[in-house]
Every structure is written in structure tokens, then in C-alpha cells.
Amino acid sequence: MKFSKRRHFLAALCMGLGLLTSTGAHAAFPDKPVRIVVPFPAGGAVDLVARIVANHLSRTWGTAVVVENKAGAGGAIGVDAVAKAAPTGYELLLGPIGPLTINPSLYPKLPYDTERDFAPVVLIAGTPAVVVVQPSSNVRNVRALVDALKAQPGKMSYGSAGNGNLTHLVTEYFLRQVGAQATHIPYKGSAPAVSDFLGGQLDMMFDVVPTALPHIRSGKFRALAVTSRTRSSSLPDVPTLEEEGYKGFNVTSWWGLLAPKGTPQEVINALNAEINKGLKTPAMQESLLKLGADPLGGTPEQFKQHIHTELARWKQVVVESGAKVD
């Protein structure tokens, strides 16, 4: 009897120590370097946002937070690498809108499932697209642009960063809402599209603010409106499409932090709290605004719902536009 009681006591003690050790391990997070995977090459907006986040976390934690670029297959290589990583919180994804919520409707088969394979941590920042035309054009507002498009259906051209890219789909979304047509010229990335626009070979573009901002400021792009519900902090003098009379138009590109599904909730909560705290600091706010992005934040649950809503929205746009990847 005494032996039995002693055995039960030792078992309970071991269980308690195990729980204490486990809790302590999570409470001590991070106790080694953390890696943030970017599914696109260095130098782009996704990469820059990741480095802003990594710098804040490194300073706060006193632990190295490394950004690793794993580009290829429209972002699928980097996204899939994190989907299959150990769910510890030490390998994270800086996820943009395209690979997470547009590509699932564009590609017949992806190696990952956005909702099944990831635990959303926090929505970091967003930026609208901005409607731009040539500065030499007679078009000076959105109404004039729509009139010009309808007067010569399909004659005006617009460029995008590629078939199925946000810059393609948001334009098609707009054209369908206003009942107009234009000729799509897809490019292999944003840089060649912008280059041809600067060369006068395109009539219009729906470019994201970080890419368009320097050309708007230099006068080489004429900005007509932004696609978000509220004005962009980086372009406070540019009206929204809703202000121009196109009600309910609200499209933004966004970036969020995600972990592999199964990552301990206390680690998710710790990451969420620290990044939300950082988004309120002048350093992070100024860095994001300089890039042309507005800080967002929020809970993991809110980010999860945002992803769910965006998946449904872009599936409808892809189907209606007939968009195909190259």
C-alpha cells in the first residue's frame, strides 16, 4: 500500500515537473535565433516589411531574428517551407496577399493550404493600389478615366506585374464594376511594367503605393485615386475611389506574420503582443509609412477571419475575370 502511494506520488511529481518544464520553455521564448521566411527576393516590399519586423523583435528580445528569402513559384516555395516547418515559433512566414489568398484560386494545385497549414499571428500592415495615368494625359479624375475607357472599349492599355497578380486583378475588378474594357499587358514583375509606363507605352495602371510613390512624387505618374476605404497616409491628397463616387470599393495589399499550424498558443500570443506593441512605436510606424504602408495590427483571430474573407473575395474575382497564370 505504501509502495503504491509512493509510486503515485512520484508519477504526479514527474508530471508536474514536465508541465513546469514545458511552460518554462514557452515562457522563455525565444531562447535561440528566430527565422522569418520571405517567399520573394530581397529588396521588394515583402522583404522590407519583414526586415522592419525583424529589427524590432531583435532589439526587443536581444536575440537574433534572421530574414531568409526563399523565392520561386509565385511565392509557393517559401510558403510551403514554413508550412512544413516544426511548429515551435522559431520559423515564421512573412506572408503577402498573393501566395496566401489569391494563388489558391489561380493554381489548380498548391503544396500548401492557407487555412489548414498555418496559424495566423498578426496582420502587420497594408497598402492600397493607386490608379495612375500618364501625366501628359487629359484624364484628371476617375470619372474622366471611365468616360475615356467607355468611349473606346479595349483601346486603352494597362500594365500589371503578371497574370493573376494583385495589380492585374484589382484592375479587372474595377473595370467590371464600372462596365468598361481595357487591354491587359502582363509583365514578369513590377519593375518592367513601371519601366514601360514611364516610357509612355501604357495608358494606366493600378500600382501598389510602395512602387508608385516615388514616381507620383516626382510627377512621372498622375495619381487619380486609391483603392482603400480611407486615404493612404503616404498620399493624403489623393482621394479614395469611394470619394470619387464608386461606393464600396475597398482593396488593399497586405502583409502578415504566420506560424506553422500547431505552434503553441502562448508563443502565438507572445509574438502577437510584441508586434502590436512595436506597431505603436514611432520607429516602426515611420519605417512602414516611408515604405508607403499603413500599420494595422490586431488579434490572431482577426487575422484568421481576414484571411478567410480574402480567400472568398479573390476566388470570385479570379473566376469572373477568367485570370490564368502563365
Image (spheres, rainbow, N blue to C red):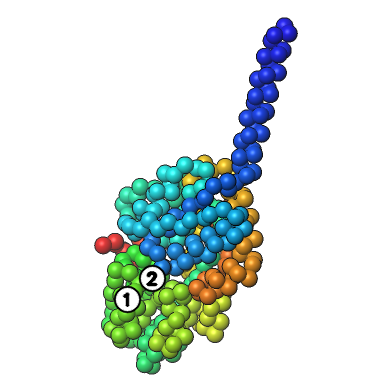
Q: Residues within 10 Å of mark 2 (few under 14, many from 20)?
A: many
What's the amino acid at mark 2? Thr
Q: Point out the tag, 2 or 1, that comes first from the N-terminus.
A: 2
Is the C terminus in the top left, top right, bottom left or bottom right quadrant?
A: bottom left
Q: Residue at x 59, y 60 (%)?
A: 59
**Is mark 2 in CB contact (under 8 Å) with mark 1?**
yes
196 versus 34 height, above or below: below
Camera-nearest residue between 151 and 63: 63
In terms of depth relative to the viewer, which is nearer, 170 or 77?
A: 77
- Residue 307 in the figure: left or right of residue 40: right
Residue 260's mark?
Answer: none
State which quarter of the image contains the N terminus.
top right
Q: Residues within 10 Å of mark 1 (few under 14, many from 20)?
A: many
Residue 309 place in picture, x, y as percent: 50, 57
Residue 222 seen from this side: no
Q: Is residue 272 above or below residue 248?
A: above
Q: Is residue 9 left or right of residue 91?
A: right
Q: Residue at x 61, y 36 (%)?
A: 22
Residue at numbered disc 1: 193
Where's residue 120, x and y in %?
53, 52
Q: Residue at x 51, y 47 (%)?
A: 90
The image position of residue 128, as x and y in percent, is 48, 72
User: Would you say 258 lies left or right of 201 here?
Assistant: right
Q: Amino acid at mark 1?
A: Ala
How far across and down, in percent of the image, does residue 194 sit?
A: 35, 78
Q: Is residue 164 visible?
A: yes
Q: Give the answer, above or below, for where 235 lies relative to 31.
A: below
Q: Which residue is mark 2?
A: 167
| Residue shown at 64% from the left, 26% from the top | 15
Q: Is residue 36 above or below residue 185?
A: above
